[in-house]
Image: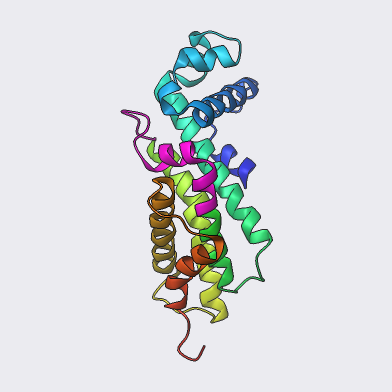
Amino acid sequence: MYNSVMTMLSTDLEPRDGRRREVVEAAARVLAHDGAGALTLRRVAAEVGGSTQLVYTLFGGKPGLADALYAEGFARLAATFDAALADAPPVGDPERVVSIGRAYCRFARHDTAFFSMMFGRSVPGFTPRRETRRACRDATLGTLVRTADECLRAGTLEATSADALARICWATAHGIAGLLVADLVAVDDATLTQMLTVPVRAHLPATR
């Protein structure tokens, strides 16, 4: 999923894509190690041994670089979801929905700078492009919608629609993740799973 997401979000297929990738990875390191405040064109350019003109040439400036970094964060989140589903029970098991929630919270805990950029305003004035937001949403929320739909088709969960169920579970995971990132709650893995299971249990068939 990581490579497919980045392909969807690519703006061209020229040879310079390798250099774009290098700059995005450098920006990701700066963001992860020193936070959004250190994310300047000069700092990123220095990380790859170039000048600020390189960043302007490849991305058109800081907004373009931030957009690519935003996409990188969602690509990593999508990869986290894929890894969680690979280790989850078979298709149609509600535990798969919970596993995505755990992966979401794990990403927020371990990639806090990315999480804050993706869902907050850590880069002042930055707004992702509409097409970037759409691709990122499809690669992440879309995975949860498809997983919820599999459960509805299997009869292991009930809801008015897979989209509605997925959004409820997403909102629950996001709320918990935000509290974890803000250091407002501290929960062990077992408690986290219990919290994420609440909306899933609310949609179990009456006979289960």
Which residue is at 55% across, 61% downward?
Answer: 189
Which residue is at 31% across, 28% downward?
Answer: 125
Q: How many marks?
A: 0
Q: How is the image coloured?
A: rainbow
Image quadrant assignment for residue 169: bottom left
Residue 156 at x, y percent in the picture? 54, 80
Q: Eyeballing the image, is 188 above or below 151?
A: above
Which residue is at 62% across, 48% downward?
Answer: 1
Residue 8 at x, y percent in the picture? 55, 40
Specify start and end residues of the magenta stretch as a single range: 105-128
Residue 114 at x, y percent in the picture? 48, 38
Q: Is residue 118 magenta?
A: yes
Q: Is residue 1 left or right of residue 141?
A: right
Q: Eyeballing the image, is 194 above or below 187?
A: below
Which residue ends up furthest to the bottom in the rendered image? 207
Any part of residue 131 in sight: no
Q: Eyeballing the image, is 54 above or below 160?
A: above
Residue toward you, 65 or 202: 202
Any part of residue 46 in sight: yes
Image quadrant assignment for residue 61: top left
Residue toward you, 87 or 147: 87
Q: Is residue 180 magenta?
A: no
Residue 70 at x, y percent in the picture? 46, 36
